[in-house]
Image: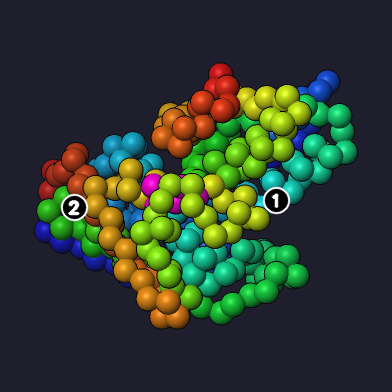
Amino acid sequence: MESFQVIDNCLMVKLPEEVDHYQAGYICREADRYLLRDDVCNVVFDFEETSFMDSSGIGIIMGRYKKIACLGGKVYAINAGKQVRRILELSGMNRLVEVL
Amino acid sequence: MKNEMELSFDAVSSNEGLARVAVAAFVTCLNPTLEELADVKTAVSEAVTNAIIHGYGNTFGYSRHGEVRPACGEYHQGKVRLVCRLEHGVLEVMVEDRGKGIEDVEKAMEPLFTTRPELDRSGMGFAFMEAFMDDLEVESEPGVGTVVRMKKKLTSGGWIAEEG
């Protein structure tokens, strides 16, 4: 299950097992709520439980990046498995997002 | 050695997972590598998502009790047809919709181009289909629908049934 948590000035987003368009809408809306409400400048996407992601996941990351990059915030991707890593690299996301 | 399957389902976002899993199950008899399986699933997911949200304009899915979630989204009735064929170790996938069609296919296939930026779409769908499959063909007519045909050679080969 996806979950959201604010630690200091970081929003931690734990992504679900499968990140597709069906899941993406809720994640985007919820993440934006935290970004507006709390004093958050960095976003960390945790892919620990994610075994599948398609371009909808890139949309989630890109959208959040646009919202916080202009304020000097950074986006991180952690615990990305092989499939997720390939998608991030293929889309060039690894140049905007720090993949740890 | 060939096998074929056909699946038709409602054009709602919650069925993307169904399409992916169906195709993955269909190719398991070829004993594909995990990477090949991930490639096929991603490409199918992209094509089916396109049909649902662009072809039919449905951005939401059915919830557990069958109602459209959320209720405010306008729902356009329609089916997505998925046909898979396996022959000589080559998987052919066809995803067909009778939605609104694509005006300019070439433009639609450009990376980062999207007609629905408000949905946080990345515009990478066709680029991923191209990258993960060996061959991609898109046929579309505005007002009639779109057909996406993709092919991929599954290198591992050898039917499990044959080996056993």
Where residue B106 sits, quadrant-wise, is: bottom left
Depth check, front residue: B28 or A20: A20
Q: Which mark is residue B99?
A: none
Q: Are marks 1 and 2 in contact (CB under 8 Å)?
A: no
Image location of residue A58, percent across then percent down: 54, 41
Q: Observer-nearest residue: B100 or A15?
A: B100
Q: Position of residue B52 (x, y in %)?
A: 51, 66
In the rendered image, the vertical position of residue A83 relative to residue B77, given as above or below: above
| Helix, strand or loop for disc 1 | helix
Left or right, B20 with reference to A28: left
The residue type indicated by label 1 comes to: Tyr
Question: Label 2, on which residue?
Answer: B90
- Protein chain holding label 1: A
Output the chain of dot 2.
B
- Whether residue B70 appears in this view of the structure is yes
Q: What predominant SS class does the magenta segment belong to?
A: helix
Mark 2 nearby-residue class (10 Å; few <14, some 14–19, many ≥20) = some
Identify the residue at image location x=56%, y=19%: A100
Residue A26: mark in rendering = 1
Q: Dividing the picture into quarters, in which one does residue A37 lie?
A: top right
Residue found at x 64% / y 31%: A45
Q: Quadrant of residue A96?
A: top right
Q: Quadrant of the N terminus of chain B?
A: bottom left
Q: Residues within 10 Å of mark 1 (few under 14, many from 20)?
A: few
The C terminus of chain B - image quarter: top left
B68 in the magenta segment: no
Q: Which residues are magenta?
A: B123-127
Q: Position of residue B8 (x, y in %)?
A: 42, 73
Left or right of residue B108: residue B158: left
For mark 2, give the secondary structure.
Answer: strand
Q: Is residue B74 left or right of residue B137?
A: right
Query: Residue at the spot x=51%, y=78% of the render?
Result: B78
